[in-house]
Image: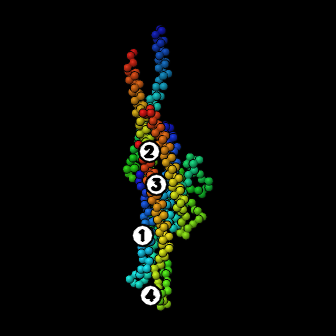
Amino acid sequence: MELFKGADKVMPYLNYAWKRHRVIVSNLANADTPNYRTKEVAFNLEEGGQLKTTHPKHFKPTSSENFRVFEVRKRLLGNDLNDVSLEEEMAKLNQNRIAYEVYMRFATGSLQKLNNVIREGR
Amino acid sequence: MEIRAVEGFLREREKSRKPEGGDFFQELGKFLHWVNKEQKKSESIKEAVLRGEEVPLHQMVVELEKASLALNLLLQIRNKLLEAFQELNRMQV
Amino acid sequence: MMELFRTFDISASGMRAQRIRMNTLASNLANFESYRVTGEPFRKLEPIFEAVETPEGVQKGYVPVRVREIRESEEPFRLVFDPTNPRADGEGFVRYPNVELVKEMADMISAMRSYEANLNAFRTTRELAQRTLELWR
């Protein structure tokens, strides 16, 4: 049954946005932790969420979600070897939140549409 | 002689028709199976949530919605089939 | 659902760490000129933050922070030349706690900002969860 194709197509994006939210929240919690490096989530949208391994030494994605958390390693470091930028993380948090809400609306919208058709618009 | 010919013709038609009817019920069976699978999936998600496993909220919501949608679809199809059957029943032969 | 609660935990750990930092800063400021019973000047307290990083947790995006310990600073004491002070040593210098007002105030502002950022993250998580539940009638 390919009834849920529309909803299923959005799911990887939704998973990604949720995981990214958690990573950003973690970054914010560690904004003043010595030796902490900013983390990000890698997600290759073009390959349907499949991560590319362009180098034999690259890690293969181990989780079924097909993305991976990695350290950004900016060159700009504070005294405490922490490279979290509070402002940047806040901006990312807000962007990501809107992206999540849009994806969520896509997913539930396509299901609601089906429900509407099934109920014949009643 | 002539009647037999018609009978033979009818039998021929029945034969050619049979796979068609079988197909429909086969599809219906597959559909029922699918609905059941969705229900089971939603049930297992519910259990996982109750057990305290790490199920993301959006996944839970979407899966439960899917299951209820599948059930709605099944109900609607059942209604339509019942209607069709009653329509046929009322028909005066 | 557990996952959602864990996300709240991350922000909560951040807020808790920052609050502990603010508390130590406040006590440092309060003891700006205090001495111990032994006559030794008060030593500045500083909380040591530590990220709870496990490979598994990182992949799940779960890296809370915790305060490993609150230790006494090894920074040198402030020396003020004041021969009339009863605490003055042979050369007329008085040792004061190693608390620097300006530094503590700057730290306080930084702690407050970080606390608010975590609070913001906490609220955002809550709103996301609420939106998700709203769409599920």
Badge 1 or badge 3: first in the primary sequence: 1
Disc assigned to residue C85: 4
Determine the CA span between mark 2 and mark 1.
41 Å
Is residue A69 visible in the rendered image? The answer is no
Above/below status of C81 relative to A38: below
Secondary structure at badge 3 equals helix
Sequence order check: which comes first, mark 2 or mark 4? 4
Checking the image for residue C116, the label placed there is none
Q: Nearer the viewer, residue C56 or C4?
A: C4
Spatial CA distance of label 2 from label 3 is: 17 Å
The tag earlier along the polypeptide, 2 or 1, is: 1
Q: Are marks 2 and 3 on the same chain?
A: yes
According to the picture, the residue beneath numbered tag 3 turns out to be C124
In the image, farthest residue toward the bottom: C90
Gap in angstroms between the C-alphas marked 2 and 4? 71 Å
Name the chain under label 4: C
Q: Work out whether disc 2 and disc 1 sit on a shared chain.
A: yes
Name the residue located 44 percent from the left edge and 33 percent from the top edge: A121
Alpha-carbon span between mark 4 and mark 1: 31 Å
**Residue marked by disc 1:** C23
Left or right, A88 with reference to A118: right
